[in-house]
Structures are given as structure tokens and as C-alpha cells.
Amino acid sequence: MNKESIIKTYELAKERYAEIGVDTDLAIAKMKDVVISLHCWQTDDVGGFETPDAELSGGGIQATGNYPGKAGTIEEMRADLEKVLTLLPGKQRLNLHAIYGDFGGECVDRDQIEPKHFQSWIDWCKKQDIGMDFNGTFFSHPKAADGFTLSSKKEDNRIFWVEHLKRCRTISAEIGKQLNSPCVHNTWIPDGSKDTPIDRNGHRVLLKKSLDEGMATEYSKEHIKDAVESKLFGIGAESMTVGSHDFYLGYAIKNNKLICLDNGHFHPTEQVGDKISAVMQFVDEVLLHITRPVRWDSDHVVTLNEDVQLIASEIVRNDFLNRINIGLDFFDASINRIGAYVIGTRAAQKAFLIALLEPTISLVEMEVAGQNFERLAMLEELKTMPISAVWDYYCLKENVPVGADYIAGIQKYEKEVLLKR
């Protein structure tokens, strides 16, 4: 797109927004606080690097599609991520699962992983000048085959996963220390029952015990932030999920942990945006996993829909950006994986920019005065305000492709790199 036309169009949009009391320059400046953690597993369909032929199995999750170009090595994954970073405005982070360690061809079980297995990732993040987050991997393993990990009644299995949790926290603390940025360490487990269980309580007693044991060691909050993540159900765990929202919210509040809200992990009629101001009354920080569930937790590529917009708006309206850790969680193997990253991340960023362009004070004043017609009218008018002109100018300032210009770059990368794998 032509630079001069982008600037000219932005100046017109700036005037339009000024008429309703919104400073577009200030909104763009505040986008620096919208830092998104890019989930590494979009590049390889959640396979990991534990074995040469590693692939996703178990856990009530699945990746669908076989589009060419899947990353098969750490080098390929990093090259893909570097390409993605060049196409996104603003600042990002890396979100890594434990199965993506640099194991050098050695078989390292999950109760044996150490910071050294992730040192090359830390070094890569330093080179990219980005922070890094981390997740334990409680699926795709023989000791998770029966559907239970930290809540397993098989004591040997439970102890194995507790040790994995301990080691993931040690690794996370080292990541945060070396990168001088707190590493958000998230714990999600697939534990649950396909059919109606009798002893729900027994598994939850064990889960609490395992979490207490696994998180007993205290680390500096400047290095690590612990989060726990719930889920409504999963494939093979339709009737009961041990780590429910009620369980983890209670655990987070009692133990001063972050609660992770994944907008694919609730009933389709529930809105995570509505939950944010509720949980923020009782926890210091929240971890978000932004995704797009279609009928269930299907992890589709994020688009700019009402659910994502409500999440962003609730955060901005209440000045929660400094208490929210934003991550993405989707994996689509049916389309170009680089394109999936860029579409999904840009959609989330647009939602936050739209939220920052809202005349919130005026809307609240209408609400307090009972001017509900006026409030609704303004919300409708905002939908057709020239957001695209502000977004394009933001991308221009960040020196990344404007509008749909990123498509050609991804097509070129696919032809020259992905299709040759």
C-alpha cells in the first residue's frame, strides 16, 4: 500500500475519532502494552522433539489436516517463528511446551528434563529480544495413556508427573532469570473420565496434593509466575474433568497463583470476557489463552469475533493490561501454518486496538445516567468507525506489512521454504 495514502487516510480517521473524544495517537502508543505470547505448537501440530517421529496423542486434543510445510526440527521451527515475527506489529513472546526441548537426539523422559535442554531456546529468545513462557506437557506419554496424570491413583504415575511439574518450574524460573522477564509457567492436565465416575473427590484430593507437592519450592516472582488452567471437557473426558474451573479458581485464589482462562475451555454459551472482571477481584493476575472454539474446544485460528472483542474490551475498559498475560492457543494443520499465526495474532491485536479506540468514559456516563438508547447507539456507530485506517498506520509505524500485504510474503516463504521440506 502507498505510504502517503496510508498517512492521509489516518489523518482523516484521527479527526473522526477526535470528534468522539478519542486520541488515536495515544491508542497506538498504548499498543506497546499488548504483548502476545506465540504458542510454538502451531508450527508442528503439537508433535514436539522428544523423538524423531513424535506426534500428538491423547489428552483429549487433536490437530486436523496435513497441509505441507510442517516444522520437523528445532531449526525449522525457529525459522518459521522468525518469519512470523517479521509480519507482526508490536512485541511478542514465545510460549514453549516441555516436549520442545533441545534434546540433541538423546531420549530424555519428562521427569528428567533440565534447564540445559532449553538453553538454546533461551539463547534464541535473547537474540530475538523477546520473553519466554513455558508449559508442562501432561499428554502424549505412556504414563498418561489411562487419562490421569497428577490425579492418578497409580502412585508411580502420579509421582512421575509431580516430578515433571517440579522440573518445569525449575526450568521456568531459569528462563525468567536469564531473560530478565518473568516466565509464565502454565499447568494444564487432561485428567478426566469418559463416563460417569463414582470417586470424583478422590481424584481432586490427589490433584490438590500433587499441585502442593509440585509447587512447594518457592522461586522469585521476578523469574516465574505460576498459572493453572481448567477445561470443561475433552475427547475421552466428556463426563468429568478433574481440573474444573471451580477447582482451579479456588486453588489459584488460595495459593496466590494465576488463573488461566482459555475461551475454548468453557461451555459455548459462556463468555470469558464476562469472567475477567469477576476473577480479578480475587487474583493478582490472569493468563489468557485466546482461541476460537467452533461448537467445542476445537482450537481454530483466532478471528476478530465478538468473543475476542469482549475479552479485549473488558481488559482495556478496566485498565487491566498490566495484570493480564496474553497468550494464543490454536493449531490448524489444514492451512499454511505461518498464515495461521499471522491471521490469529493480528486478529487479537486488532481487538485490543479497537478497545483502545473506544470512548469508554462517555459510555460509562451514559450508562450511569440510564441513557441506554444512547449507549447502544454509540456502540453501533463505533463498529463502522475507520479502525482499518488506524490499524494500517500502526503497522506502517512498526515497519511491518500493511493490510493484506503480508499474504504475498507468506506465499513466497511457502514456495521457497515450506514446500521443500
Image: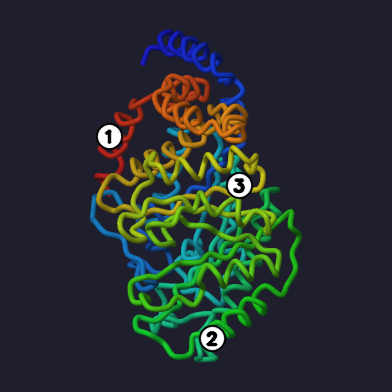
Q: Residue at x 60, y 78 (%)?
A: 163
Residue 244 on image: x %, y % = 50, 71
Q: CA gap, disc 2 to disc 1?
A: 52 Å
Q: CA gap, disc 3 to disc 2?
A: 38 Å
Work out whether residue 326 or residue 87 is closer to the camera in this orientation and state it: 326
Mark closer to the chain start, 3 or 2: 3
Q: Which residue is mark 1?
A: 411
Element carrying mark 2: helix
Residue 131: give its label.
3
Q: Residue at x 47, y 38 (%)?
A: 85
Residue 192 located left or right of residue 162: left
- 10 Å neighbourhood of mark 3: few (<14), some, or many (≥20)? many
Task: For marks 2 and 1, give the one nearer the viewer.
Answer: 2
Q: CA gap, disc 3 to disc 1?
A: 28 Å
- 10 Å neighbourhood of mark 1: few (<14), some, or many (≥20)? some
Q: Which residue is mark 2?
A: 201
Amino acid under disc 3: Gly
**Proximity of marks 2 and 1: CB atoms separated by less than 8 Å:** no
